[in-house]
Image (tube, rainbow, N blue to C red):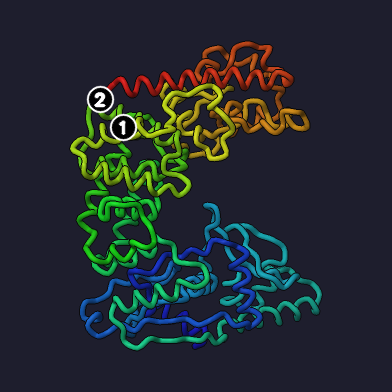
Amino acid sequence: MKIFEILEHLNRKEWVLPPFQRDFVWNDKEKIIKFVDSLYRDYPIGSIIIWKPHEEDIKEEIRGRPIDATVSREPLWTKKYILDGQQRLTTICRIFNGDPFVFKGREFILHFDVKNEKFCFLEKGEKRENCIPFHEIIHKKNEELLEELKLKEDSEKFRAISLFEKVRQIKDKEISLETTHPLRRTEALDLFIRLNTGGKPLATENLALGYISIRWPDVRDELEKFRNNLQKTGFKFDFDFFVRCLSAFSLGQSLKRRIVPEFGKKNMKDDWEKIRKGIARLIDFLRGELNIHSNRFIEAENVLIPLVLIFSRENVTGGRRSLLAYAFIISYLNRRYSGGKFGNLDRDIKLILKSTDPVEAWVDVLEKDRGTLKHLEPSDIVEDPNKTFKLPFYLLLKSKGVTKDLLGRNFVEIAASEENRPEFHHIFPKRWLKRTKFEKDKDHIANLTILTSVSNKEILGKNPTYLCEVSDRIKEWHLIPKDKELYKVEKYMEFIKKRQELIASSLNQFLKEKKLKR
């Protein structure tokens, strides 16, 4: 089938995604450019597989969703469902319609570089000499395009027109199309899974959502609606986190590929309502008990799963909330569930689900486990490749009421502008440690604190002795040693050692206070 015919089906929403199909996941510029270049050069791009539903499923009306592109016309024919080829078809539809692609939160439009005869992405609104948006080549006349390029020589104009026609020929490219014989929904899911076992494997959460959708077709819509509502509070979670919470609550264990088929054996909608309530209570807990208003510094989200389970069962109140905060920080500090430690998470899930007092039970097992770090020595405050100390350190600063960075600028956790957003930056600027014996220790956790990006840029060029001008109050907030001799580059490791002592002492006091409020 020719691409222009495929576009008709997509734009009329006659070819849609089945409930178990994943979202558009191509987020690599080079991969998309190579794909479009293959279309341009008439290279094979593989087959598209369309599911034709069994008449019994047609009666039940399968809830399909359009591809992630601008499609607005009404269907003329019975809907069919894209089993394989969604990423390719979505890309084709987007480039022909001029829809943006999002890379790292910014919108880009595919362009064709006439001079170099190659495709490239430019940020939306950006102009570059010799570059024309792909969709404009498809939809505009040559005269308009030439006027935009401002070419002077006739030879250049003839060459450009020739290249425009070559780009337009993409719409006439034949793509191999295979349509299944009528399949029931479970058979289509089975085929979908088989198709996704080769190449880049289907992520476990997407596989789980496929099974969940058999009994709950609207699952993706419900999860998306909840995710959008959460973002208004400053917390951003993806479907993976939601599915892992469902696995813990519904299946009683952490999410693993081998248990995914279990999701298809019951309707998860009722369990999701409980998980949804648990996550909402979790956010209220993080905001109220720990004074954090986003999950930007929570690198290990698995540590939140026991909390969601507990809040799904009850709304923890009083001193038990403080004790729960203690358990959260201890489990985070000890990387209890990181690095594929499913055993710890499975044991804690089972414990919480069967316990009459899950908060006390969780704290008890955390403290009794061998090797659990409960009291910090200065030597424990070490380099931070896994970002283990950043969140506890941030919680500590928040508990101390820190609202200003080292240069006295206010920071806002959920800031409209990036320049006011708190980030971990270096106290001794890296440039002052470069080519010294301390260079390998420049990223030590004891050389980091919260700064706004504006202050960080200002500090970048300063000698570390700028700390002499910082007020004692702000130094106390940020646990900066007050001895000015330590601000000299040659005293860097002494500064680190002293700050390790201050951080360890303050974190121990912070944990003690949380535990004693029980």
State left or right for residue 331 relative to residue 348. right
Q: Residues within 10 Å of mark 1 (few under 14, many from 20)?
A: some
Residue 469 horizontal/vertical position (percent): 63, 15
Mark 2, secondary structure of its residue: helix
Residue 171 horizontal/vertical position (percent): 56, 82
Q: Residues within 10 Å of mark 2 (few under 14, many from 20)?
A: some
Mark 1, secondary structure of its residue: helix
Residue at x 24% of width, y 76% of height: 61
Residue at x 72% of width, y 22% of height: 463
Extreme-left residue of the structure: 356
Which residue is nearer to you in this view: 303 or 230? 303
Could you tell me if residue 97 is visible in this image? no
Q: Work out which quarter of the rendered image holds the C terminus and state it.
A: top left
Q: Which residue is mark 1?
A: 363
Residue 111 horizontal/vertical position (percent): 63, 67
Which residue is nearer to you in this view: 44 or 457? 44
Residue at x 75% of width, y 70% of height: 116
Q: Which residue is mark 2?
A: 319
Dot 2 or dot 1, earlier in sequence: 2
Look at label 1 and name its amino acid: Val
State left or right for residue 94 relative to residue 29. left
